[in-house]
Amino acid sequence: MNMESDRPKSEARAMSGYATEADFCKDLAEGLKPLYLLAFLLTGRHIEAERCFTATVEDALGAHGVFKGWERSWSKRCLITHAIRVVFSGAPEKGVGPDSWCEFDRESTERSVVNAIAGLVPPLQRFVFVMSVLEKYSDHECALLLGCTPRRVLEARNHALGQLSGVNPGLTKLAG
């Protein structure tokens, strides 16, 4: 890769209002923990979360046509689509539960909430809860990304809230 020939392209993209690789690198470095947490909440497994995160970084470094300032939302959406592919493309593993968020941390409210969300089953409920409640995606947008109806999104969210209400009653207030 010739850095000299790539510089004018990068400078032209920056001047045109589009995000550059440097913009994505800066955003990914600043948002590393929340983006990985999002990947873990969606997949419930560290290996799959790492796979989704890595694929998102690779996509970000090759991204063209993303407006400057939209790097974070683009990265989140990209990560969500990777997680959807990873979780819903294969046959579910029988008898394999979610990973624990942190093996070495003492039990805390935050850890138990993360583990409860990552443990939502079926996965559609987990995705809908994370996407619609935590990430504030509309039911229509969730339905489009997940390949289901908005009514199915509503039902999945209600089931997820029912499962989570026993863990932390404050979680049901998030959906309000």
Image (tube, rainbow, N blue to C red):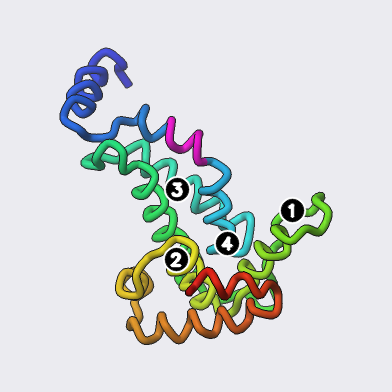
The residue under the point 28% across, 34% down is 19
Q: Quadrant of residue 17?
A: top left
Q: Residues within 10 Å of mark 2 (few under 14, many from 20)?
A: many
Residue 58 position, x and y percent, is 41, 41
Q: CA distance from mark 4 to mark 2?
A: 10 Å
Q: Nearer the viewer, residue 56 or 37?
A: 37
What amino acid type is highlighted by mark number 1?
Answer: Cys
The residue under the point 27% across, 36% down is 68
Q: Which residue is mark 4?
A: 41
What amino acid type is highlighted by mark number 4?
Answer: Leu
Q: Which residue is mark 3?
A: 55
- Earlier-in-chain disc, 4 versus 3: 4
- Is residue 166 depicted above or below 6 in this figure? below
Of circles 1 and 2, the one toward us is 2
Q: Quadrant of residue 44?
A: bottom right
Q: CA distance from mark 4 to mark 3?
A: 16 Å
Q: Which residue is mark 1?
A: 102
Residue 26 position, x and y percent, is 43, 30
Q: Which residues are magenta?
A: 26-31
Of circles 1 and 3, the one toward us is 1
User: Overall secondary structure of the magenta stretch?
Assistant: helix
Residue 50 position, x and y percent, is 57, 50
